[in-house]
Amino acid sequence: MKQLYSTLVWLLFFTLFLTSCRLLDRKSDPSAELEGEILIWHTWDGVQQAVLEELFDNFSELFPGVTIVGERFAPDNLQAAFKEQAVLGLGPDILIASADWAQDLHQQGLVKDIQSADLATDEFLANALGVLQNEDDLFGLPFTLNTFALYYNRSLLNPQRSQSESDAELAQLVQAQQAEITNTATLQTLDNLLTQFASERSEPLQPPANLEELLQQANAGHKVAMRSDFYGAFWGIQAFGGQLFDAENRVILNQGGFANWLSWLKRAGDNPNVILNRRSRTSTDLFINGDVTYYVGLTTDFPILQEALGAENVGVARLPGRQNKPAGPLLEVEAIMFSRAATDTSYAISLRLAQYLTSNEQQKELALLAGKLPTNNQVRIDPRVSPVMAEFIAQGRTAVPIRLENRTIMSDILKLGNDFYALVLDGEIGVVEAANSLTQQVNDTFGLETLVASALDACDVTGTVALWHSWSGKKEEALIATRDAFIKGCPEANILLVKLEQTELFDRLSSDGESRKPPALILGVNQWIIDLASQGIIRDIDAQIDPDFLQRYAPVVERAARFNTRVYGIPVNLDVAALYYNTRMVEDPPAVLDDVLTFATPDTPFAMPLGF
């Protein structure tokens, strides 16, 4: 019996020893911690699906106990299928889909809030992470990006000519000029032309770096196709210094930038070589058919365009900005979301897989092999390796996200925004009215305050400056009140107001000699700018004025303060011609010029100045 008891003790000890060895093995081998099978639903196909499944296989090699099953769905069917299965506690463990769905799916109890998982998120692009995260929640991890970029047809931008054609063209040019040579000046002209011709042959045309260059190339015959709906034509607002939301989540499209962007769009639309279309498919077809040189399209369009035109003919560039401000197209995020129906084991595997898929190495592989824009901010692509992806990534970093807290309000903005874009481009309303009305309507719908002009910041300037003006009456009273309000905010500053008749004011500014002692500031009409600037009496303030500051003005007003493209003044008020009529004599004034002839009778005479 004693021998049997001793044997049992040794067996127990040996069993415990083996168990402890296995536990030590699992601690030393992290791959042993993960065991199980997970199901992933997605919409990737073709080469992209093959790359994704290869990453799944690589993960399973790192964790041999893990099996990953991927199932593809048609994009139009995925959301409905997931909701149908997840509500029953079935379906996938991971859903790879648009981040736009995340908040709604969480509110329905179908996907997890993973904030408590305490994952490291510092390597994600901030604009991508903000689509899924707020102060309290994280409804998934950003996986890939999609935004807008500028595509161009290389064969249309720089048509290839044979050497014989180029030589023949050059010979014809030389012969035509030689026939006209009679003096040295003409010979110099010929040299200049030959130099220009050689330069044009050696320097291919590049995609536009800014909005004005885009219009210049359009004027030169390079056609541009771009969308004119709010979503597809949002990208220029940031370039003009505008924003969609402020820190309080209020719509602030009336605070500058938006009206100027609409004005640029309207000006561009008047160019016969710029084709604005509300249907994205029309613009895509124009590019694919070789009808336009430039096309503003989504980054996901690239495989389609490449297949249609050939990889050698499709170039990609960032959307043109303005005055060192980059374009800001809206950002789409594809997310990895986690089913609430997943078991603890499946959830643990899913989290580890998501971290693997969003790591620097895997994101770079997805970019180079599948053409997917990375969300990891550590990914760097050498332009020599993939110039297209390098441009996409650069564009993605300046793209504008719709943050989680703004998701609900965005649907109203898109709908109303489309209407206002159409009204402006059709000439039904002005750009300033559109900016103000859109802002007011959306904020009112959601009970948000609509901001007016920004308040003056704290002021620490000192000293006294003189301001000459010719205002009188209520305008002078308003000027004095404004001066007093400024001094109240800047107690160490003083503004000395000097009132002169308008003619005397201009004459004293323009006079020569000692009598000319101009003040620091002048209130005058913009017609003076050319004369005073040409004489060097007023200085250009282009370098001192933040372009964002000028976005608060209507575009035509802002241009009135310029001379030779430089800013020489700050617009203060408008004085425009208007038609006055006596309501005791006329009930309805003339609406068009032809009506004037009808209205003008001995009983209702019409008077107008004859000067230019």
Image: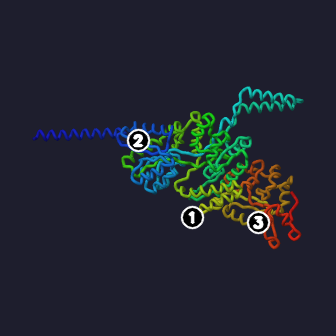
Element under label 2? strand
**Tag 1 or tag 2, which sits nearer the N-term?**
2
Mark closer to the observer (1, 3): 1
Q: Residue at 74% of width from left, 33% of height from top?
A: 200
Among all residues in the image, which is located at the extreme bottom?
584
| Camera-nearest residue between 416 and 366 | 416
Q: Gap between marks 1 and 3, in whole Å?
A: 36 Å
- Mark 2 neighbour density, 10 Å: few (under 14) some (14–19) many (20 or more): some
Q: In the rendered image, which quarter contains the C terminus?
A: bottom right
The residue beneath circle 2 is 68
Q: Name the residue rendered at 75%, 49% in the picture.
A: 566
Hey, which quadrant is residue 10 in on the image? top left
Q: Residue 475 carries which label?
A: 3
The correct choice, above or below, for 363 with respect to 551 in the image is above
- How far apart are the alpha carbons under marks 2 and 1? 47 Å
Q: Which amino acid does label 1 sit on?
A: Gly
N-term-proximal mark, 1 vs 3: 1
Q: Residue at point 50% right, 37% down?
A: 365
Residue 368 vs residue 483, the one in the foreground: 368
Question: Does the rendering let one see residue 478?
Answer: yes
Name the residue carrying label 1.
Answer: 447
Q: Is residue 568 visible?
A: no
Check disc 1: other Cα within 10 Å, few if <14, some if 14-19, many if 20+: few
